[in-house]
Amino acid sequence: MFQFKWSILEIFADAKGVKYHVSGTDDENTVESEGNHCFSEGVVYKPFTEIKEEDLIRWLEIDTTKDDVNIIKLNLQNQLDRLKNSQKVQFPWEVDTFTIE
């Protein structure tokens, strides 16, 4: 099961845009992303002085969702899936770097 944690790092021009951070976690791994988002017209509907972080996160999720798919969450899920299905190996330049004679 994937879990996501959002936070707002900065807010721009009376909440017309935000800088966000989101992390996605599964049972084994965590991936993170940061970005800037400018809200579509009409998404932000509260007076600036009444806006809370939870409002901005909810609007960000709504505004980045199309056809019931949130593109930011989807990208994090894809990264977590790749990590789960990848086999980790040593860096090739570190293999047998030192030899004992």
Image: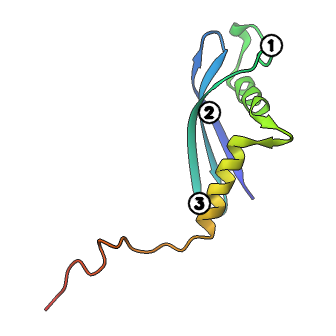
Which image quadrant: the C terminus?
bottom left
> Whole-percent x and y of residue 99?
19, 85
Would you name the residue on which mark 1 appears?
Answer: 45
Q: Residues within 10 Å of mark 3 (few under 14, many from 20)?
A: few
> Whole-percent x and y of residue 32?
57, 46
Secondary structure of residue under mark 1: loop
Nearest to N terminus: mark 3 or mark 2: 2
Q: Quadrant of residue 89?
A: bottom left
- Amino acid type shown at disc 2: Ser
Q: Residue at x 60, y 10 (%)?
A: 13
Which residue sits furthest left? Answer: 101
Determine which of the numbered discs, if any, sits on residue 17 in the image: none
Number of the front mark, 1 or 2: 1
Secondary structure of residue under mark 3: loop
Nearest to N terminus: mark 3 or mark 1: 3
Q: Nearer the viewer, residue 57 or 80?
A: 80
Q: Residue at x 75, y 59 (%)?
A: 1
Would you name the residue on which mark 3 appears?
Answer: 29
Secondary structure of residue under mark 2: strand
Q: Are marks 1 and 2 in contact (CB under 8 Å)?
A: no
Compared to residue 21, the image places residue 26 above or below, namely: below
> Whole-percent x and y of residue 56?
71, 24
Would you name the residue on which mark 2 appears?
Answer: 7
Compared to residue 19, the image places residue 44 above or below, namely: above
